[in-house]
Image: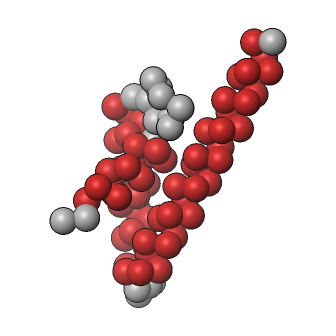
């Protein structure tokens, strides 16, 4: 059905890490709400479904980038 992309996006935006072992249910819930607001806003703006997927993909890339920066900063603090 294609809901996998939305589930992964909600988890990543909610703070779950690709590096493993982090994330909360509340963070995932907030990520799902952000996804719903984003998709609803894009629908109200009459954005095509393909462009909505691109926009959500960009948001996921930004969330992963922030996660990588956070892990690098935490590694510096430990050293």
Report whether residue 67 is seen.
yes
Whether residue 44 is visible: no
Report the front residue among 45 and 71. 71
Farthest-out residue, top: 79
Specify whether 79 is left or right of 3: right
Asked if residue 3 lies left or right of residue 27, the reply is left
Quadrant that contains the C terminus: top right
- In the rendered image, residue 1, in percent from the top left (x then y), is placed at 18, 65
Q: Residue 62 at what x, y percent from top left?
A: 61, 54
Q: Residue furthest front?
A: 19
Where does the image place residue 24, in percent across and percent down from the top left? 39, 28
For residue 78, above or below residue 39: above
Q: Residue 40: where, in percent of width, then height?
A: 37, 70
Report the residue at 34% width, 41% height from top. Answer: 29
**Measured along the vertical axis of the image, is residue 67 above or below residue 45?**
above
Query: Residue at left 50%, top 72%?
Result: 54
């Amino acid at each position: 059905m294609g809901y996998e992309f939305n589930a992964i996006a909600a988890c990543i935006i909610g703070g779950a890490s690709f590096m493993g072992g982090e994330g909360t249910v509340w963070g995932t819930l907030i990520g799902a709400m952000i996804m719903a607001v984003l998709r609803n806003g894009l629908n109200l703006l009459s954005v095509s479904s393909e462009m909505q997927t691109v926009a959500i993909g960009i948001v996921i890339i930004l969330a992963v980038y922030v996660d990588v920066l956070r892990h690098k900063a935490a590694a510096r603090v430990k050293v």
